[in-house]
Image (spheres, grey):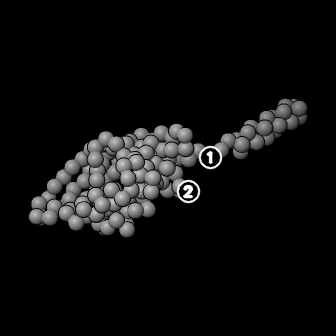
Amino acid sequence: MSTFRLAAALLLLTLSGCASDIPARINHRDQVAQNLEGLKQGLQAGTWANVERFFSPAWYEGYGELRDRMESRFRNEQITDLQFIVNRVLENDGLVNAQVRWHKAWVDRTGTPRKAEGVSEFTLKPQGRSYRILHMSGDRLF
């Protein structure tokens, strides 16, 4: 009987040792959702200074062009509601690709309320516990 207990104890120690060698999996979905919540707040504040930290200077289409386009949008519309729903997240070659459904409501310069929704693919570069947007495809949010 004591041999059985000794074998069981060794088995438990072996299994517990293996469990500690398994690297902790990063929950990219939750982290992407948190990052997009910060982007949402910055977009609703309506200035480039509030959103620039979410974009990589290596933005695919040109960082300066992105800034100019967004500053023009901030002058012409006030976002009243913005929601991001993270559908799927994949990690590949150190980058994270997230499919995001979004809903946006805003008031244009004339005071007319408007709405839009779509699905975009975000290519993100992890940077600590946050992400920088490198590229967006699909429906255009901005």
- Number of residues whose C-alpha sits closer than 10 Å to that of mark 2, classed few (under 14), some (14–19) or many (20 or more): few
Q: Foreground residue, 125 or 103?
A: 125
Q: Foreground residue, 27 or 54?
A: 54
Q: Which mark is residue 137?
A: none
Task: Say what secondary structure mark 2 lies in.
Answer: loop
Where does the image place residue 4, in percent across and percent down from the top left?
Answer: 84, 31
Where does the image place residue 69, in percent across and percent down from the top left?
Answer: 28, 58
Mark 1 vs mark 2: in front: 2
Residue 71 higher or lower than 134, as above or below = below
Q: Is any part of residue 88 visible from this angle? A: yes
Q: How far apart, in angstroms, are the residues tagged by discs 1 and 2? A: 15 Å
Seen at 71% across and 45% down, the residue is 20
Residue 30 higher or lower than 19, as above or below = below
Where does the image place residue 90, in percent across and percent down from the top left?
Answer: 48, 39
Q: Is residue 34 left or right of residue 48?
A: right
Seen at 49% across and 50% down, the residue is 125
Where does the image place residue 98, in percent across and percent down from the top left?
Answer: 42, 43
Q: Which mark is residue 24?
A: 1
Seen at 45% across and 52% down, the residue is 58
- The residue under label 2 is 128
Seen at 42% across and 40% down, the residue is 88
Q: Mark 1 and 2 residues: CB-CB less than 8 Å, in contact? A: no
Tell me which amino acid carries mark 2.
Gly
Answer with mark 1 or mark 2, whichever residue precedes in sequence. Answer: 1
Which part of the image, by quadrant, shows the N terminus? top right
